[in-house]
Image (cartoon, rainbow, N blue to C red):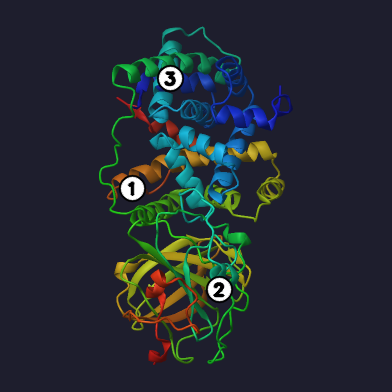
């Protein structure tokens, strides 16, 4: 699902008056939500994250006095409600995950992997250069010395290791749906990702 | 509030769904509120995925990991992405498997389940195999390479103790053929390197050793000798193999018809400009099934004999 436009705009405008900062904070909150729903083993973490953000946005739209100090914590309350509802829904629909939405399953795992790698290449190619370099560097193998390697990457970029992790996972959060959509619909080739500042023109429904 | 308050074991237990619900909720409140707790969880998730893929999890942890992370499409996608980004070969979990004394001796470690054929001509190594229902995953970085069994005949640089990984193959009904080409093989510099692609092969993985690693990214263009591009891979990052720097590119086997190919490697600079970084000529020939594998070129169990190839055919 996508967020309704008015809820999305209400949320962004309240997160930060600067559109770029608001976009970054939005991505931060959304990543936390996606992970929350994924770690809780829901079937569609991204949909539930967007449902949560939609509810938050609508609440903010309806009550302009709300100014949470900690946005993530504020959003967490909504997320728990959405989680509970999704559990109920799963029980009603028979508990099982719905059929995969992948349109065409490839014949073999090797073919699937080949297609995934092609899509990964395309999606990586659509990322801004610095994001692409960062995520590839982060995941480069280093013979069991992964933590030290990542520490070095963080130092080279002048940021803390935790900040590096958050940045990398934000990039992943953009990369993952791109690869998924590409695998399911190869005719949809990614061209570029929206930058945080332009995200307002992104995942909204009219 | 920081990650020091939440030890690694607890984060791991949360991710594996082992914390009581009350503790789960408490931890969730903390990671929603604090960046470093959340970053600690992301790190723990990465480490779990890497441990799972490299076979470092205990049997109980592996089972738990599969139940939690691989039970949903999103969890599987996340693991696959981590695997693909890290250049790993298989989503399948490692299952230790004893090898026969012969193969244990020839190929270490014992869990290697792929066949290895080393071409008589130096500069090209080929590995292949197929899934036999005992999925394994190589710790490729730690695996010693098989030794070449024949000396170089053409003056091409030998891979020496290079890291051609005899990786296990992930594809039911399919196989990956790995081919290593040494750097410095140029057109018109002697006979091209030849190998056969067994019929069940789905993917050919070219490992191209680089003379120097001067670029952050590389592009490989697979062309005919006439210069027609057949396939290309871009955005390739260099890997540091035992033999030196190299890049890896995978191509669908069905699109590699018998014939001569030139893999042209370009280094991609930070501003997007490219420079030539090497050319590798090889020839794909039709496979010949041999009745008896030759010990000189064949180190694999009999059911992998498709990898065998009579290199006396080389022209």
User: Residue A74, position in %: x, y?
Assistant: 54, 15
Q: Which residue is mark 3?
A: A52
Q: Quadrant of the N terminus of chain B?
A: top right
Dot 3: what SS?
Answer: helix
Residue at left 49%, top 65%? Answer: B248
The residue mark sitting in front, 3 or 2, is: 2
Residue A88 image-quadrant placement:
top left
User: Is disc 2 surrounded by few (<14), some (14 to 19) or many (20+) residues within 10 Å?
Assistant: many
Residue placed most toward the observer, B234 or B90: B90
| Chain designation of label 3 | A
**Could you give the CA–CA distance between mark 3 and mark 2, rounded to whole angstroms?**
49 Å
| Chain designation of label 1 | A
Q: Which residue is mark 2?
A: B209
Dot 1: what SS?
Answer: helix
User: Residue B74, position in %: x, y?
Assistant: 42, 36
Residue at left 45%, top 87%? Answer: B187
Dot 2: what SS?
Answer: strand
Q: Is residue B33 left or right of residue B76?
A: right
Residue placed most toward the observer, B48 or B87: B48
| Chain designation of label 2 | B
User: Residue B244, position in %: x, y?
Assistant: 63, 71
Tags 3 and 2 on a common chain: no
User: Residue A157, position in %: x, y?
Assistant: 68, 47
User: Is disc 3 surrounded by few (<14), some (14 to 19) or many (20+) residues within 10 Å?
Assistant: many
- In the orientation shown, which residue stands out farthest toward the right? B4
Q: Quadrant of the C terminus of chain B?
A: bottom left
Q: Is residue B291 left or right of residue B17?
A: left
User: With respect to residue B138, does A30 lie above or below?
Assistant: above
Q: Which residue is mark 1?
A: A183
Tags 2 and 1 on a common chain: no
């Amino acid at each position: 699902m996508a967020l309704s436009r008015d809820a999305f705009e209400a949320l962004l405008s309240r997160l930060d008056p600067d559109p770029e900062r608001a976009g970054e904070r939005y991505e931060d909150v959304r990543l936390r939500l996606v992970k929350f729903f994924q770690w809780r083993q829901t079937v569609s973490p991204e949909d539930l994250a967007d449902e949560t953000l939609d509810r938050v946005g609508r609440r903010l739209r309806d009550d302009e006095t709300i100014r949470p100090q900690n946005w993530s914590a504020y959003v967490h309350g909504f997320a728990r409600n959405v989680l509970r509802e999704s559990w109920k829904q799963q029980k009603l629909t028979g508990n099982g995950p719905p059929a995969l939405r992948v349109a065409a399953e490839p014949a073999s795992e090797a073919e699937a992997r080949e297609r995934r790698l092609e899509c990964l290449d395309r999606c990586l190619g659509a990322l801004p250069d610095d994001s692409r370099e960062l995520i590839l560097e982060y995941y480069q193998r280093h013979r069991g010395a992964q933590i030290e390697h990542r520490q070095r990457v963080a130092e080279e970029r002048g940021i803390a290791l935790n900040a590096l992790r958050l940045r990398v996972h934000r990039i992943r959060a953009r990369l993952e749906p791109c690869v998924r959509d590409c695998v399911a619909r190869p005719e949809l080739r990614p061209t570029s990702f929206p930058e945080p500042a332009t995200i307002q023109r992104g995942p909204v429904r009219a | 509030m920081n990650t020091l308050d939440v030890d690694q074991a607890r984060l791991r237990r949360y991710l594996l769904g082992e914390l009581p619900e009350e503790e789960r909720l408490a931890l969730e409140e903390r990671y929603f509120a604090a960046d470093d707790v959340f970053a600690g969880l992301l790190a723990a998730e990465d480490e779990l995925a890497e441990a799972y893929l490299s076979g470092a999890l205990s049997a109980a942890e592996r089972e738990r990991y599969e139940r939690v992370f691989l039970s949903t499409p999103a969890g599987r996608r996340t693991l696959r992405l981590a695997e693909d980004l890290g250049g790993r070969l298989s989503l399948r979990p490692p299952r230790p498997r004893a090898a026969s004394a012969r193969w244990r001796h020839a190929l270490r470690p014992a869990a290697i389940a792929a066949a290895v054929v080393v071409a008589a001509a130096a500069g090209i190594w080929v590995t292949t195999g197929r899934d036999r229902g005992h999925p394994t995953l190589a710790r490729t970085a730690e695996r010693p390479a098989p030794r070449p069994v024949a000396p170089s005949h053409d003056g091409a640089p030998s891979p020496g103790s290079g890291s051609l990984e005899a990786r296990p193959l992930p594809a039911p009904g399919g196989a990956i053929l790995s081919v290593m080409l040494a750097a410095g093989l140029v057109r018109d510099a002697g006979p091209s390197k030849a190998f056969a692609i067994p019929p069940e092969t789905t993917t050919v993985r070219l490992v191209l050793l680089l003379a120097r690693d001067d670029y952050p990214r590389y592009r490989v263009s697979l062309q005919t000798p006439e210069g027609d591009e057949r396939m290309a891979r871009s955005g390739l990052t260099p890997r540091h193999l035992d033999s030196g720097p190299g890049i890896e590119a995978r191509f669908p086997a069905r699109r590699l018809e018998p014939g001569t190919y030139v893999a042209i490697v370009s280094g991609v600079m930070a501003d997007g400009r490219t420079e030539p970084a090497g050319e590798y000529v090889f020839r794909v020939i039709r496979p010949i099934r041999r009745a008896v594998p030759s010990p000189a070129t064949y180190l694999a169990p009999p059911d992998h004999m498709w990898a065998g190839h009579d290199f006396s055919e080389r022209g």
